[in-house]
Image (spheres, grey):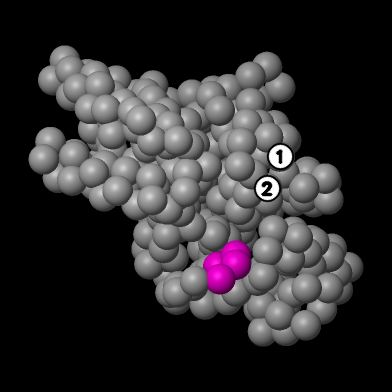
Amino acid sequence: MSGGVPADLHDRLTGVAHDAAARPLLVALDFDGTLAPLQDDPRASRILPEGVAVLAALAARDDVALALVSGRAMADLHLLAEVPAGTFLVGSHGVERARTTQFGLDRDVVELSHEQADLLSALGARAAAVARGRDGVWVETKPTAVVVHTRLAEPTDAEPAEAEAIALGAELGVGTLHGKDVVELTVLAADKGTALQALRHELGAPVVLYAGDDVTDEHAFEALDPTDVTVKVGAGPTVARYRVADPQSAVAALQALHQALDEADGA
């Protein structure tokens, strides 16, 4: 292990960096729990300072494309993520997409039909009833989804709230994503894997590096190719090919990649 980066991952990153056929390289990353340590208050999440620096360094290269792929709503992700201009932002598990510029966001517009808008409103009201009377359970409304959060709740409140949210999704026939301490109910079908593959094809990226920590990141790991670099951050079962311990180690892996790319330039 080198600087928190397992030897097998370090070797793979070095190999990708020295492979001219792997350009452009798409570096795509989850936000919470991957670049930013998990916080009880989601508004307090920030990318580690050394992560901000290495993302800027990678984005400055002509042969690397940078993306954040998150379950957060786009406005929230853009507000909290300190990323350089040119970074692709994929929010709401793939429903929302934008690219950062010097002047703000260049966003793809998401439009709901009247039926979908009505369903979203109904979801909000029903989800509020799930949270009512349960300490630490709260509801977030996104442009296309409603999210029941349970991170602040005790298991006696969290477990039945999550079960009821999942049952609500089944009853109303909407998409349901069950992640860490969260259940998202969406009126537009989307997942990180589909969004990531679409982006890689648009960019013509032969190789993708993707790192994530949550259950929803498994969709991305499963969708990517055997030649791609998939990295699970933290504990838990995964289909990712590599694993690092925590966000600090994930940032160290990005630093190792950047160093290897610089070395390849000088070879």
User: What residue do we see at 71% from left, 22% from top?
Assistant: 102
Circle 1: element type: loop
Circle 2: element type: loop
> Disc 2 marks which residue?
36
Where residue 45 sits: x, y (%)? 67, 39
User: What residue do we see at 65% from left, 71% from top?
Assistant: 244
Where residue 10 sits: x, y (%)? 72, 77
Question: Which secondary structure is most common in the magenta stretch?
Answer: strand
Q: Is residue 24 left or right of residue 110?
A: right
In which quadrant will I find the N terminus?
A: bottom right
Q: Is residue 188 left or right of residue 138?
A: left
User: What residue do we see at 63% from left, 31% from top?
Assistant: 43
Observer able to see residue 108: yes
Where residue 224 sits: x, y (%)? 42, 65
**Residue 234 among those drawn in magenta:** yes
Tell me which amino acid carries mark 2: Ala
Contact between marks 1 and 2 (CB within 8 A): the answer is yes
Badge 2 density bin: few <14, some 14–19, many ≥20, Cα 10 Å: many
- In the rendered image of this protein, does residue 129 appear above or below residue 253? above
Q: Quadrant of residue 25?
A: bottom right
**Residue 71 among those drawn in magenta:** no
Q: Which residues are magenta?
A: 231-235
Near-viewer residue (33 or 10):
33
In which quadrant will I find the C terminus?
A: bottom right
Tell me which amino acid carries mark 1: Arg
Badge 1 density bin: few <14, some 14–19, many ≥20, Cα 10 Å: some
- In the rendered image of this protein, does residue 142 appear above or below residue 84? above
> Disc 1 marks which residue?
46
